[in-house]
Image (cartoon, rainbow, N blue to C red):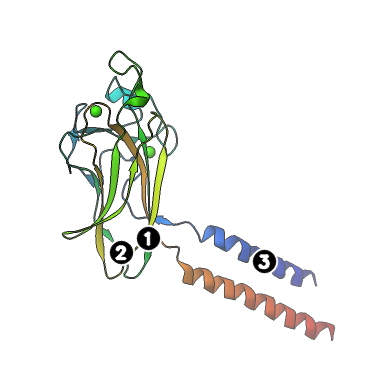
Amino acid sequence: MNTYKTIVAFSLLTLYALPVTGAVPINLVKNGSFELGNIGFTSDYVPSIYDGGYVITTDPSIFNGNFDSVADHTTGAGNMFSVNGHATAEKTVWESQNIHVLANTTYTFEVWAMNVCCKPSAAFPDPASTNPASLRFDIVIGSEITTLGNMDTNLNAGIWDSFSTNWLSGTSTDITLRITDTNTEIFGNDFAIDDIRFLAPVPEPETYAMFLLGLGLLGFMSAYRKGKVN
Ligand SMILES: [Ca+2]
Ligand SMILES: [Ca+2]
């Protein structure tokens, strides 16, 4: 009976634990947290403190003295992608490496962004009135561009906001993700991006297999107990 109880308890624990351990999605974006530095993406922006410039930093105020001193989203002490908005329209802020996707599969895109303008100063007496960036999130498949959505950064500096949406791959097999700032103001329009994720679905067949194995164990032990008692 003790063995029976132990196995039933183990099976139940397996059933409860699997949805948790099996539910960790895989991020297909290389260096989406920017913790590896200036790698894994392309950009029309250049390393610079001026308009149309970016830097990977733990604190945007080091990059540009007018920017607010704010922490990254990943850990509060890591890197973020800090940007001084471009004056020319349709410049790519960030574009992922090629991402291979499975056909007819739903993926989840997530990104965090914040306004980093500005420290109160003579130039920016009321930072909350400065222009927030207007970000557009696209999926690029060859020459075809599909917009996933748009997000303005918060009017106030230092507040991380997120954008998240699902995308069905259809017949697509290879994509890139692209972020563009549609605001071309140079006054304000300074922002940071962090934790860009393109999440593959959880591998469900394995979870179901373990679920059925657990049920099988329960059934077997139930039959075993019945036989022993009678
Ligand atoms: Ca980060
Ligand atoms: Ca600016």
**Disc 2 designates what residue?**
101
Taking depth in this image into account, of 161 and 37 the one nearest to the observer is: 161
Taking depth in this image into account, of 177 and 35 the one nearest to the observer is: 177
- Residue 3 in picture, x, y percent from top left: 75, 70
Task: Compute the Cα span from label 2 to label 1.
Answer: 9 Å
Q: Amino acid at mark 1?
A: Tyr
Q: Identify the mark at residue 12; answer none if there is no mark.
A: 3
**Disc 1 designates what residue?**
107
Location of residue 59 by image quarter: top left
Q: Amino acid at mark 3?
A: Leu
Q: Residue at x 18, y 37 (%)?
A: 45
In the rendered image, the vertical position of residue 133 relative to residue 220, given as above or below? above
The N terminus is located in which quarter? bottom right
Count residues near mark 1 (Cα–Cα under 10 Å), then give few for <14, some for 14-19, many for 20+.
Answer: many
> Please, which residue is most extreme toward the right here?
230
Q: Earlier in the sequence, mark 2 or mark 1?
A: 2
- Residue 224 in picture, x, y percent from top left: 74, 82
- Residue 75 in picture, x, y percent from top left: 45, 37
Q: Residue at x 56, y 62 (%)?
A: 19
Q: Is residue 117 left or right of residue 214?
A: left
Q: Is residue 227 left or right of residue 139?
A: right
Taking depth in this image into account, of 101 and 89 the one nearest to the observer is: 89
Cβ atoms at labels 2 and 1 below 8 Å apart: yes
Q: How many labels, in total?
A: 3
